[in-house]
Amino acid sequence: VRLVESGGGLALPGGTLRLSCSLSGNVFKVGRVGWYRQYPGKERESVATITRAGSKVYVDSVKGRATISRDNAKNTVYLQLDRLMAEDTTVYYCYQGIKYYKDSYDYDDLWGQGTVVNVFS
C-alpha cells in the first residue's frame, strides 16, 4: 500500500498547480487526508486537510488560494493552489489516514514520497 503523488513541478507566480495523490493497494477505510509541506530546516506543516465527511482546514497562508478535495471512491485527494507565490516553493507531501483492516483499532499514517513545487519567474 502506498500513495502516488503527481502534479508538482515548475510554475509561474500567479499561476495554478493541481496536486493529486492516489492510494495504491487495498485498505479497509481511508479517514482524514491532506497535504503537508516542509521547508528546509523546518518541521512539516499542514497545508490543507479534509475529513471523509468533507470538513476542510487550511493553513492561513493558503486560505483563499487553495482548494482541497477528495474522491472517496478512488481514494484520491487533490490540492489546487492558485495565485502561486514564491513562498509556496518547497516539497509537498500527501497524507492519508488508513485503516488497513476492519478491526484496526485506529488509523495509521501513510505518507507520500513528496513532490516538489517550484514557483519562479
Image (cartoon, rainbow, N blue to C red):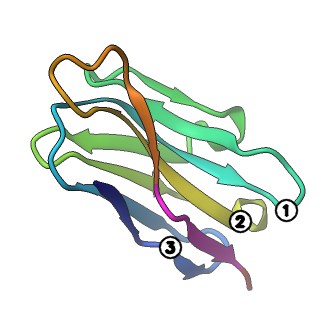
What residue sits 78% from the left and 60% below the top? Answer: 87
Mark closer to the chain start, 1 or 2: 1
At label 3, counting other C-alpha atoms closer than 10 Å, the crowd grade (few under 14, some 14-19, many 20 or more) is: some
What residue sits 21% from the left and 45% below the top? Answer: 75
Q: Name the residue under label 3.
A: 8
**Contact (Cβ within 8 Å) of mark 1 with mark 2:** yes
Mark 2: secondary structure: strand
Q: Is the magenta stretch mostly helix, strand or loop?
A: strand
Depth check: give the residue in front, 30 or 53: 30
Q: In this view, does 43 lie to the left or right of 96?
A: right
Residue 18 drawn above or below residue 61: below
* Foreground: disc 1 or disc 2: 1
Residue 111 on the magenta span: no
Mark closer to the chain start, 3 or 2: 3
Q: Quadrant of residue 71?
A: top left
Mark 3: secondary structure: loop
Q: Mark 2 points at which residue?
A: 90
Q: In which quarter of the image is residue 68?
A: top left
Mark closer to the chain start, 1 or 3: 3
Q: Looking at the picture, how far across and down is residue 74, in whole percent?
A: 14, 49
Q: Looking at the picture, how far across and down is residue 117, in whole percent?
A: 61, 71
Q: Looking at the picture, how far across and down is residue 35, in whole percent?
A: 51, 46
Q: What stretch is highlighted in magenta?
A: 112-119
At label 2, counting other C-alpha atoms closer than 10 Å, the crowd grade (few under 14, some 14-19, many 20 or more) is: some
Q: Is residue 76 left or right of residue 109?
A: left
Q: Can residue 83 be seen in this view?
A: no
| Type of the residue with mark 2 | Thr
**Contact (Cβ within 8 Å) of mark 3 with mark 2:** no
